[in-house]
Amino acid sequence: MKRVLVILLTVLMILGIGFSLSSCKKKEVKAEAAASAEPFKVAFIYIGLPGDLGWTFEQEQGRMMIEEELGDKVDTTFVENVPEGPDASRIIRQYAQKGYNMIFATSFGYMDPMVEVAAEFPDVYFEHCSGYKSSDNMATYFGRMYQARYLSGIVAGKAIAQGDSIGYVAAFPIPEVLRGINAFTIGVRKVNPTATVKVVWTNTWYDPVKEREAAVALLDSGVKLITQHQDTTEPQKAAKERELVSVGYDSDMGKFVGDSVLVSPKWNWGPYFVKTVEDAMNGTWKTHSYWGGLKDGVVELSAFSDKVSQDVKDLVASETKKIESGSWDVFWGPLKGQDGSVVVADGAKMADGDMLGMNLFVEGVVGNLGQ
């Protein structure tokens, strides 16, 4: 009997040791798996330099927010000064081949290159800024910047004498830029009905020399205020050198140029970037066409310069509430085109599709499409 008990106890001890070793082994495997889990890799393709203090600067602020919010769960990187066009395909493809899980292409001209690469890498998430083409693994994102442009136009219109002209340094005659010019002009003429907005095209997003030259040409023509759709602060600096005021764009340009910049319509990409990356990490990402506005916080106005009066600030606040509530938007009628023809009838509103494909100037704009 004793012998049987001894044998049973021995067997139980062996089994216990086995279970213990098995349990330890499982814990070790889990620990090794956790240690070897790679961070979610995200790459950004930039048209300019993060130090441009404008467009790329704000995209970079968003990238850094991803790192701040998600920490070691992510690994982000960027490449700067990537030309739009065929070579962008090579750059985007390189990051997909390196094992990056998500790629953001931050300029309109990257659209077709990204479409091409997205088809080759169905397991990679692709996000394209300001375009209109998408697929199962490629989404688009942008913001209703025209809303903030309109508000900045009110500030500009109040800053000049009745009937004066404003200079607008513009990149390319594409819908995004035309929406901004038109919305700004509508804001200007709300408070200054005879003012005009004079447009000069640079045909570049980022070229500090060309941007300054265009601003100087406008200033030489007699405009009293400068604004722009470019990537640097050079137009604002040119205005300041003439002791004139300006309206910024992309980022809070008053921080870099001074209080001669009355206000800046600016981007706030961080919250969108963080949510999009989290969705991809969690497996809940779906293709989409994001176009948020003032109420979503993706577009906003910077702080006002001390040169802006309280009554102007109050008017801007009132107009902001109307837009955010949905009771009114910038391209609601009545609205006339540059030639005086009716673009949007009284009581009607321009559809999103028409805004996204905009190819016209509104009344008050001086200049030609594409020239």
Image: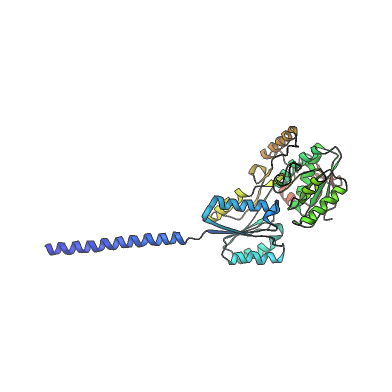
Residue 153 shows up from this direction: yes
Q: Residue furthest top?
A: 311
**Which residue is drawn at the image coordinates 55% and 50% (left, top)?**
69
Asked whether, in this view, residue 249 is left or right of residue 92, the answer is right
Q: Quadrant of the C terminus?
A: bottom right
**Which residue is drawn at the image coordinates 80% and 41% (left, top)?**
188
- Which quarter of the figure has residue 302? top right
Q: 267 or 342, which is in the foreground?
A: 267
Q: Quadrant of the N terminus?
A: bottom left
In x, y percent, where is residue 306? 73, 37
- Which quarter of the figure has residue 286? bottom right
Above-or-below relation of 77 to 161:
below
In x, y percent, where is residue 172? 78, 55
In x, y percent, where is residue 2? 12, 62
Residue 282 shows up from this direction: no
**Which residue is drawn at the image coordinates 55% and 53% (left, top)?**
279
Q: 165 or 180, which is in the foreground?
A: 165
Q: Residue furthest left?
A: 1
Above-or-below relation of 323 to 124:
above
